[in-house]
Image: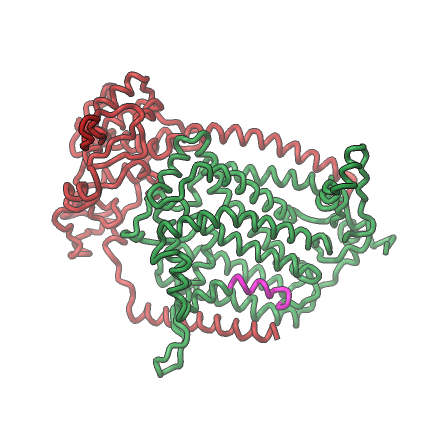
Chain colours: A green, B red
Amino acid sequence: MSFPWAQEYKPQGTVSKWVDERLPLPRLVYNAVGAGYPVPRNLNYFWNFGVLAGVALMIQIVTGIVLAMHYYASVDGAFNSVEHIMRDVNAGWFLRYAHMNGASFFFIVVYIHIFRGLFYGSYKAPREMIWLLGVTIFLLMMATAFMGYVLPWGQMSFWGAQVITGFFSAIPLVGEPLRQWILGGFAPDQAALNRFFSLHFVLPFVIAGVIIMHVWALHIPGSSNPTGVSVKGEQDTVPFHPYYTAKDGFGLGIFLIFFVAVTFFAPNMLGHPDNYIPANPLSTPAHIVPEWYFLPFYAILKAFTVDFGIPFTGIILIEAKLMGVLAMFGSILLLFFLPWLDTSPVRSGHYRPLFRKFFWFGLIPCLVILTYCGAQPPYTQWVVLSQIAAAYYFAHFLIILPIVSRIERPLALPNSITEAVTGKPLQTAAA
Amino acid sequence: MVRLVAFLVGLFFSGMLLLGLGDTVITAIQEPAQPTAEHEFYEKPLAVSFPQDGPFGKFDRGQLQRGLKVYSEVCAACHSLKLVAFRDFAALGYNEEQVKTLAKAWKTEVPSINPETGEAATRPAIPADKIPSPFANEVAARAANNNALPPDLSLITKARADGTAYVYSLLMGYREQVGYKNAEGKELLKEFPEATTPPGLNFNPWFATLNIAMANPIAVDDQVAYDDGTKATKEQMAKDVSAFLAWTAEPKMENRKSAGWAALGFLLIFTVLAWMSYKTIWADKKH
C-alpha cells in the first residue's frame, strides 16, 4: 500500500523493462526506499536511526562472517584463535575490534530508535505491528549479543554464560534440567560453546528476516513524524529518494565517525578487562558484569532481594531469585503491551504535557540510574538506588502510563504536517 | 483487561521492590557494612605516561628492546608469554639474524620429540616458535612458586584496568608493611591489625588483595645491564617492561591508529559532501 500520489516506477531501458516484467525487484526497491515511498517532510534526526540500525547489522554480518573463517569454537582453542585473529590474520585486529564495538554501536542506535518510538508514540495505531516486530528484533539482538560475548571464551564469557543460563535454574521443578538441556552439560563447556557459535551465526539472518517484516509493516501506514499528525495530502510528504536518502547519507557519515573513533582509538573502552583472561571454571571473577547494554536489565534482576510468601508462616511462594528473573524478562516483555497500555490518541510527546513530565523526569533518569547501578558491586547505596529505579520502571509502564493517558489534557495539535512546518494554515486540502 | 492485569503486575513488582528497599535499609542500619583493608588501602594505578599513549602515540623501539631484556632476564624465570612468537620481535627493530640469535639463545628450549627414539626432548627455538614457557604445565608452575600460579603476561596490560600503569605501579609498589601509611596518612596496621601479610606473601597496596605471592622482582638498580647505555634504575626497568608488555598485548596498535586517522579523514570528506548534498536537495523544501 502507499499514498495515491506515490511516484510510479517507470522502467526506461529495454533491459529494465524486461526485468520488470519477469521479476519486479527494482520496482520493489523503488517503492520501499526509492522515490516511490512518500515520507512526511518534517522528520527530524531521530528518524535516521532505523536506517543506521540496518547499517549496523550489515557491519556485524560482514565482519562476523570473515571472523568465523578464522575463529575456532573449542574450549581449548577459542581464546587463542581470537588472539590469532588479532595478531596474525591480515587486518584481523580491525575485523575483531569492528565486530566487538559494532555490537555496542548496534545497541546504541537501536536504543535511540526505541527512545524515538517511546517519545513520539510510534507504537500507536496503526503502527502496533511495527512495534511488536521491533521488540522481537530487540529480543533476538539480545540473545545474539549474549551468545557472541561467550565465543572468545574469556573469564567474562564463561562466567556470563554461567550466570545467564543460571536464570533458567530459578524456574521451579524443570529449571535445573532445562538449564542442563540448554547448556548440553552441567556447566558451560564444549557443547555450549559449539551451539552458541551455531546460533550466533544464524540468528543475525533471522533478525534480517524480521527486519524485512518490520519495514514491510512500516510501508502499510507509512512513517510516523514528530507531530504525530497523520499525513493528509501530498504537500505533507516528500519522496524518500532523494530527500531522505540524502539525509540518511549525512546521518551515516556522523554515525561512522563516532564508530571509527571508538573502534580505532579506544577499542576496549566498552569492554571488560577480565575478558582478556582465558576462561577458568575454577576461578570466579570478583565482579561478574554483563556488557553495558544489558546493565539496566541486570540491575532489575539484582534489585529483587526479598522472597514473596505468606507473612508469619515462613511459606515462600516465589523466591527472590525467580522473581528477579521474571521481572527482568518482564521488563522487556511488557513493551509488547505498550500500544494497549498507552491509550492516549495523541501520539507525539510534544503535545502531551503530563506524559512528557513522567517521560523526562521519571523514565529517562530511571534508565540512567539502572544502567549505572547494574555495573556496581552490591553496596547498600547502589542496591537502594536500583530498587527505587526498578520500582519506578514497572510503575511507569504498567500503572502511570495508563492513568496518564486517561486523565491528561493534550495540547492543541496542528491541523497538518505542512501547517506545523510552514506555520501557515492549510490552503489546499487534498483528499 | 490488559490494563487491569498490567496494573496488578505493576503493583506486585513495584511493591516487592519497595519491600526489598525497606529490607535493604533496615539491614544496612542494623548491620552496617564493615570497611575492609582491601577497600580502604588499595591504590589505583599511578599516573604514568608512555610514548604509545594517545591517538598519535607510537612505541619507542629502544624502550621495547630494553623491556624485552628485562622480561627475558627477570620475568621469564616464572612468567610465560605464550601468544608472542620470536618472529614478532622484528617489530621491535631487530633484523632477521638478530631474531634468529634471540630465539636460539633463549634460556628455555622448545618441547620436541627425539627423531630417533620418539621420546620427549627439547630443541633450541627458531623464529617461528612462540616464546617457550618456563614451566611445563600449571602443576609445575605452582610447585615451584609456593602454590601460586604466575599468570601469562602476553595480555596482562589489557587484562587489568589501566593495565600498563597497573604493571608499572605493581612493580614499583612493594612497601614495608610495618608503619605503612597511605596518602591520607592512615596507618594500615593501626586501622586493621588483622591485615598482617601472611607468610609467603608480599605486601603491595597496588595489588587487589594487598598481598601478592610474587616477591619484588625489580629489587635493585642495575639488575639488568642495558645495551644502549641507559641507566637501569628500578623505575626505568619497571617502565620499560611495562611498555614492552603493552606491545605484547597489542602488537598491531600502531597500524590501528594510522588506519584510524585515514578512516577518519575519509569519513570527514564523505560527511561534508553528504551534508552539502542534503542541503542542496532540501533547499526548496521547508522542513
Q: Is residue B63 visible?
A: no
B223 sits to left or right of B162: left
Looking at the rendered image, the quarter that the C terminus of chain A falls into is bottom right
Name above or below for residue A257 compared with residue A321.
Answer: above
- Residue shown at 67% from the left, 48% from the top: A44
A383 sits to left or right of A402: left
- Residue shown at 73% from the left, 55% from the top: A220
- Residue shown at 71% from the left, 57% from the top: A228
Q: Main secondary structure of the magenta part?
A: helix
Q: Is residue B277 visible?
A: yes
Magenta-colored stretch includes residue A334: yes
Residue in front for this viewpoint, A210 or A120: A210
**Residue B114: horizontal and vertical position, in percent?**
20, 28
B45 sits to left or right of A178: left
* Region rendered in magenta: A331-341
**Residue B180: horizontal and vertical position, in percent?**
18, 47
Q: Quadrant of residue A354?
A: bottom right
